[in-house]
Image (cartoon, rainbow, N blue to C red):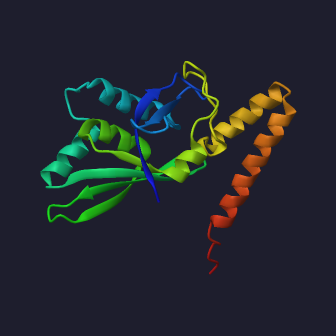
């Protein structure tokens, strides 16, 4: 599977709900300039913005603490790979090297990986098929307006968009949102194991 390197591009203005932001990752130089938006919360946005401007706090924040522990333990970062998205959550593996040269794969939040990558300077990749499927579309000339795929949005945000569509009497959009919410809930129910009855 072909991997595409992504770099931090930008952070959007506040979305609805008010504590959400769109972190935009951009295909690294030499690519097709495809972009991916990851919806994140305010604390995650703050950690990434601090890394972007190189702000150092008087005491180490979580990402600095984690880096210190990894380096002190003789490990190093290799790369990260974004490999899936489901219900607005992107899934990422973080690869590290142990002191004996073997690799360790850790499941990680995409926001943590980006914040760490901006501090420790390791590459982030995404599977090309996933990027092509989830990339931003209909990007305005100034880049401030774009279309997200439905996978990139959480069910909570879909429910808020549904309420707004009903309020605005946009019943076609409301119907589409209702159907997607129903599909997700049914899928989740089939994934949950049956309770054990004793």
| Frontmost residue, 66 versus 197 | 66
Residue 177 image point, x, y percent: 76, 41
Residue 38 image point, x, y percent: 51, 38
In this image, 96 relative to 128: left or right? left
Q: Is residue 100 visible?
A: yes
| Frontmost residue, 124 versus 166 | 124
Quadrant, the C terminus:
bottom right
At 30% from the left edge and 23% from the top edge, which residue is drawn?
53
The residue furthest bottom is 198
At 84% from the left edge and 29% from the top edge, which residue is drawn?
170
- Residue 9 versus residue 78 in the image, above or below: above
In this image, 69 relative to 62: left or right? left
Residue 193 image point, x, y percent: 62, 70
- Residue 11 versus residue 91 in the image, above or below: above
At 49% from the left edge and 34% from the top edge, which residue is drawn?
33
The mark total stands at 0
| Frontmost residue, 4 versus 196 | 4
Residue 90 image point, x, y percent: 51, 48
At 57% from the left edge and 46% from the top edge, which residue is drawn?
132
Q: Is residue 88 visible?
A: no
- Residue 115 versus residue 141 in the image, above or below: below
- Residue 51 versus residue 68 in the image, above or below: above
| Frontmost residue, 30 versus 95 | 30
The residue furthest top is 142
């Amino acid at each position: 599977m072909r991997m595409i390197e992504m770099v931090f591009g930008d952070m959007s203005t506040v979305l609805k709900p008010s504590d959400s932001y769109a972190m935009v990752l951009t295909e690294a130089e030499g690519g097709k300039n495809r972009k991916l938006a990851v919806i994140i919360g305010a604390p995650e946005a703050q950690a990434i913005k601090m890394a972007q401007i190189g702000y150092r706090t008087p005491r180490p924040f979580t990402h600095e603490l984690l880096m210190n522990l990894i380096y002190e333990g003789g490990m190093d970062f290799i790369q990260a790979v974004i490999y899936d998205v489901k219900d607005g959550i992107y899934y990422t593996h973080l690869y590290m090297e142990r002191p004996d040269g073997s690799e360790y794969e850790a499941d990680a939040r995409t926001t943590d990986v980006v914040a760490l990558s901006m501090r420790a300077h390791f590459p982030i990749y995404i599977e090309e098929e996933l990027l092509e499927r989830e990339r931003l579309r209909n990007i305005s000339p100034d880049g401030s307006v774009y279309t997200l795929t439905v996978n990139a949005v959480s069910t909570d945000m879909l429910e808020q968009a549904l309420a707004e569509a009903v309020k605005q009497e946009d019943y076609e959009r409301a119907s589409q949102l209702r159907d997607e919410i129903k599909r997700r809930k049914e899928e989740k129910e089939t994934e949950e194991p049956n309770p054990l009855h004793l």
